[in-house]
Image (spheres, grey):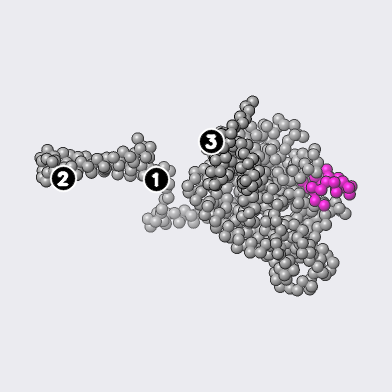
Amino acid sequence: MGSLKLPNKREIIRYNTLFSALTKYGFEDVMASSKLKRLVPNSYLKSHPETQKLLSFTTYERIRMVLEELGPTYVKLGQIFSNRDDMLPPGLIKELEKLQDHVPTLKNFNVNDVVEKELGITNSEHFQSINPEPLAAASLAQVHKAQLLTGEHVALKIQRPDIKSIIEADILVMKQVAKNLQKYSAKAKALEPLRIVDAFEKSIKEELQFLREVGNMERFAKDFEGNNAIYVPKAYRKLCTDQLICMEFIDGIKVSEIEKLNTLGINPTQVAKVGVDLYLEQVLEHGFFHADPHPGNIFVIPETEQVCFIDFGMMGTIMPNDQETLSDLLLYFLQKNVKKIIPLLEKVAVKVEIPDYKKLEYDLYELIEDVSNTALQNIKLSSILDQFKTVLYENKITLPHYLYMLIRALVIIEGVGLKLDPAFNMTDNLQPYTSKVTKKRFSLKRLFKRNLNRFQDINELVDTLPDDINTILKKIKEGKLVIVHEHKGLKELQEASSKAVNRLVFAIIIAALSIGSSILVIAKMPPLINGIPLLGAIGFVLSGLLGFYIVISIFRNNQF
């Protein structure tokens, strides 16, 4: 094992000079991310407290600090990227996950004035009291507790002032940066930064529509109507706007507060099972799921032991066709049928550029075999999903944004289950659903529906086929039929041919100038300078310059 050689006095002086220069010209990051910081003299650190403070943080910690400093848009962006470990290193992912919990509250925020202005009311008409101290702060809003005149306790989720204009300005900057990255960096282009920013813009704008969140709560409540295992908070629509939500205050216990659950005689193991079952029901049966199920958003109602989800701003929706595809994926995964999995991935993906199908087939088979050879109690869904994302990334398959949200959410909910019950295994919760999927797949109702849909498609094709044929024949007769043909690689061929022709023309000109100049020199055509014809000399110089230019351009483009 290598040992660190301590520097002598002369070396310390040089290190001091080096660190001073690095700090002076903005290279503190070089010091913080290398072994050099171990050699920084204490005398230097004492005289430069800012550098000393900087060196105590890692690069990834400082990235998180920058996002927090830049404000809510960048905090939200960091939160969304905290699930993209197929793109970012684990150390950075860990730091970005901290953005969930460290959002400062608003300063000089008068909640009473904001509520009155937003609702266009006098608070005394509806509220007994509004607590000026916030219960919680998030990147887009903060929450205050209040009491209605009826005595009901409510939570007021209030959007941060001027947040929309701030976000719009930030997104414009992000788009410009993404365009430049996509234009000038091949590595960045492969990650499609512009598409990522567009997806982020859509997501964050949806979260800013608070009335949409109220609609999400109502839809969620309808999905679980009659299910006594879950409690969905009520929204007071008359006291809601696009910037403010008034909802029932949930006086529950966070699922992360295990000691409190035990004190009240609530079994955390049972809470884990019920909570995860409810989440799988959201995904696999309703196709409408909570996209941010971290422990702060899941409560247990002490009196009824019901599980309660809060914060419905970020929800994922799975279309019926995709829902069936996901069910089939789960089924084929259990059957180890790799050849059926690949077409389903292509069907659900937004972008597919698989360079080698055999490699993809092998990668998927290896993943399935790894899972099959692992004892059931040792299987971790988060690990499987991480491997699955790696396979997709390496084989250039891009899933829709909602599926990345789902993957992240499943990893979070498994983490919640493990915190409540260290022996928790999500595959136990999945087994009843796999049985349901199998039965549903071969049910008479499904077979009848699928065949009916196919019959309708064939019928529609038969109905429209004569008209389509007539339209094509009419265009052929009128000479208006246009066939669009794309020849891949033709543009590059044209560019190469154009360069070759240009160089050939230059070569002919050079040859002509050289031959013409030689004739002039031999004929001693006046005017003469020191016995050399002036026009001949000019011709030789021009041909030499042109020849030199062609040689330089060939070497510059590595075309020799």
Q: Which residue is mark 1?
A: 491
Which kind of residue does numbered mark 1 sit on? Lys
Q: Residue furthest top?
A: 1
Q: Residue at x 10, y 45 (%)?
A: 526
Which kind of residue does numbered mark 2 sit on? Leu
Percent position of residue 361, x then y: 59, 34
Q: Residue at x 70, y 40 (%)?
A: 382
Numbered disc 3: secondary structure: loop
Mark toward the start of the polypeptide (3 vs 1): 3
Q: Which residues are magenta?
A: 253-276
Separation of residues labelled 1 and 2 (CA atoms): 42 Å
Q: Which residue is mark 3?
A: 356
Q: Which residue is mark 2?
A: 535
| Main SS, magenta residues | helix
Mark toward the start of the polypeptide (2 vs 3): 3
Q: Quadrant of the C terminus?
A: top left
Percent position of residue 542, x then y: 23, 44
Q: Nearer the viewer, mark 2 or mark 3?
A: 2
Percent position of residue 14, x then y: 55, 37
105 versus 336 height, above or below? below
Numbered disc 2: secondary structure: helix
Can residue 247 be seen in the rendering of this structure? Answer: no
